[in-house]
Amino acid sequence: MAQIRGTANYHLGPDHRPFGGPSHSAATSDPSPLDAIREQTSKIEDLLDTFAEPVKPYLPAIGRFLIVVTFLEDALRIMTQWGDQLLYLHDYRRIPWGLTHLFLAANVVAMLICSVLVIARRHSEYAVGGLLGVVVTQALGYGLIFDLNFFLRNLSVMGGLLMVLSDSWHRKRFAFAGLPQIDEKDRKMYFQLAGRVLLIFLFIGFVFSGEWSVSRILVSLVGFVACVMVVVGFKAKWSAVLLVVILSIFNLIINNFWTLHPHHPQRDFAKYDFFQILSIVGGLVLLVNMGPGQFSVDEKKKVY
């Protein structure tokens, strides 16, 4: 279209060479670096699609389960460490004795019920709202809202929950054929964009925590490029797969809680971090399945 608009008013054909310069076809015979990158990433995406074809029908279920697994583990930990949790809230957080029981019980019930609803794809809006409420109330109750790593990780968990909402609206768009779906479509676009942006905050926390090394710098640079591609929606599926691989390897190496003694002081922290990263991986799996949405470079390329 750009060539048609550019030559229509001046009667310049494709072989016209103004000022004796090279023809248009000769000037554009060599692909630009961006075109070369697109060509290579397209080949990688095609290869990934080939290998992922057998598991593709199961990706939504896998993603949803991984997203809520941190809430299921948290509910189990509260029930098995009930006394310790009560003492911490009462002695360190100065929460009155009766409210501590109510706080823990409400969190356990909400996490169990909402997690089951998310996995079963039932009442996703209420389930996601309940889990978002759990994230906020726990941040306030345990006094971790000003902990930067905790804050960034939970932003990513929220991004995964928003991807669950987008996935539920994506699946419901065929339920009412013939009826207007504009509002739902708009919601899906905005929530998909917000989910994409929030998912990458965990990697930002990873970059600015821990000791620097050559391998850490290389992983951070590769991950940063992948995060930017996810946010803008350029080759988002390929970038999300790359982040899934990086986070999974990092999770197994750093948060290997199963190698620690049951009474090791860091075991619970490593276990908590392990399942939180699994939840964020689940959000990225949903992104791989759904795509980046209409607010993305990938979708704009389809239009133009």
Image (spheres, rainbow, N blue to C red):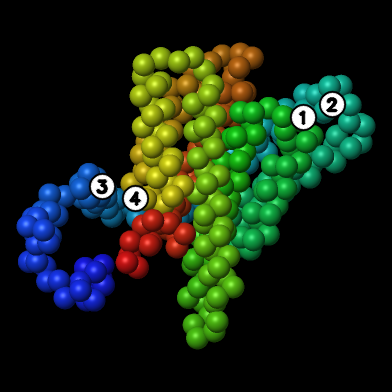
**Pointer 1 or 3: first along the chain:** 3
At 49% from the left and 26% from the top, the residue drawn is: 207
Q: Nearer the viewer, residue 40 or 142?
A: 40
Judging by the rendered image, the residue that carries numbered circle 2 is 93
Q: Quadrant of the N terminus?
A: bottom left
Q: Secondary structure at mark 4?
A: loop
Mark in front: 3 vs 4: 3
The earlier-in-sequence mark between 4 and 2 is 2
Q: Tell us which disc is closer to us: 3 or 2.
A: 3
Mark 1 neighbour class, 10 Å CA radius: few under 14, some 14 to 19, many 20 or more: few
Q: To which residue does mark 4 refer?
A: 235
| Residue 190 image position (x, y, % from top left) | 56, 60
Amino acid identity at mark 2: Arg
Task: Say whether disc 3 or disc 2 marks the residue closer to the N-terminus.
Answer: 3
Q: Are marks 1 and 2 in contact (CB under 8 Å)?
A: yes
The amino acid type, in three-letter code, at marker 4 is Lys
Residue at the spot of label 3: 34
Q: Nearer the viewer, mark 1 or mark 2?
A: 1
| Mark 4 touches mark 1? (CB < 8 Å) | no
Q: Secondary structure at mark 3?
A: helix
Query: What secondary structure is marked by label 1?
Result: loop
Q: Position of residue 134 (x, y in %)?
A: 71, 44
